Amino acid sequence: MNQTSLLLNAYYEALHDLLVENKPRLTETAENLLREELKNRSFGSFNRNKYDAYLEACLAFIAERIEMYNPIGVQYTVDRIPSGLAQELELQLNFYDSRSEFQKLKDAAAELTQQGLSDDQLPQLATELIAQVGAFPDRSIISAYQAKPTLNKLPDYITALSIEKTIKT
């Protein structure tokens, strides 16, 4: 494994630990953001059951994202075998295209490891990488939603925005 890959693994592990530690704040942030987004958009009427269902979806997406960053699960995100067909299928399933964001993440990690890397530096550089690029793939999700807000994108958007707000504070 090269130094850039080591840093990317440390990045995901740091995100996992940060989000696990801040899960109560993530939940509160998601609730507030969902309420605010529904108030500001014309998504029709929302009774308590519909609101609760969307909040439940947001919280499930947060749990899924935390698990994605888990050091055991991260291999499926970073170390996957490149397959053109698999990538195309993923793009068809997602409403956002995160290829550019992932390339920026890899480029930023490569830049941070240019001068070499020691085990002592990994946590600090992972934190620096999070500060530089945020949590992948949040920026792609946020920009795609903001370009064309729809209810089916709302749980992903609330999840991404909650995570970004949490890691920035």
Image (cartoon, rainbow, N blue to C red):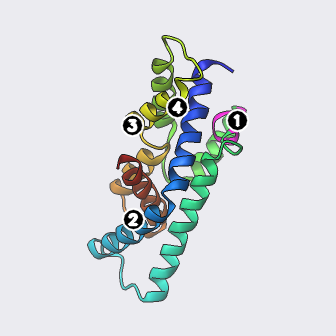
Residue 54 part of the magenta-drawn span: no
Mark-to-mark CA distance, 2 and 3:
19 Å
- Circle 4 residue: 123
Residue 144 showing in the rendered view = no
Q: Secondary structure at mark 3?
A: helix
Between residue 157 and residue 62, name the one nearer to us. 62
At x 56% / y 27%, what residue is drawn?
Answer: 7
At x 68% / y 33%, what residue is drawn?
Answer: 79
Asked if the residue under mark 3 is in contact with the one under mark 2, i.e. CB atoms within 8 Å, the reply is no
At x 58% / y 66%, what residue is drawn?
Answer: 60
Circle 2: residue type: Thr
Mark-to-mark CA distance, 4 and 3:
12 Å
Circle 4: residue type: Pro
- Circle 1 residue: 80
Q: What is the magenta range?
A: 75-81
The dot on residue 92 is: none
Relative image position of residue 1 (x, y in whole percent): 69, 21
**Is tag 2's residue or tag 4's residue first in the polypeptide sequence?**
2
- Circle 3 residue: 131
Mark-to-mark CA distance, 1 and 2:
32 Å
- Circle 2 residue: 29
**Badge 4 local density, few (<14 within 10 Å), some, or many (20+)?**
some
Mark-to-mark CA distance, 3 and 1:
25 Å
**Mark in front: 3 vs 1:** 3
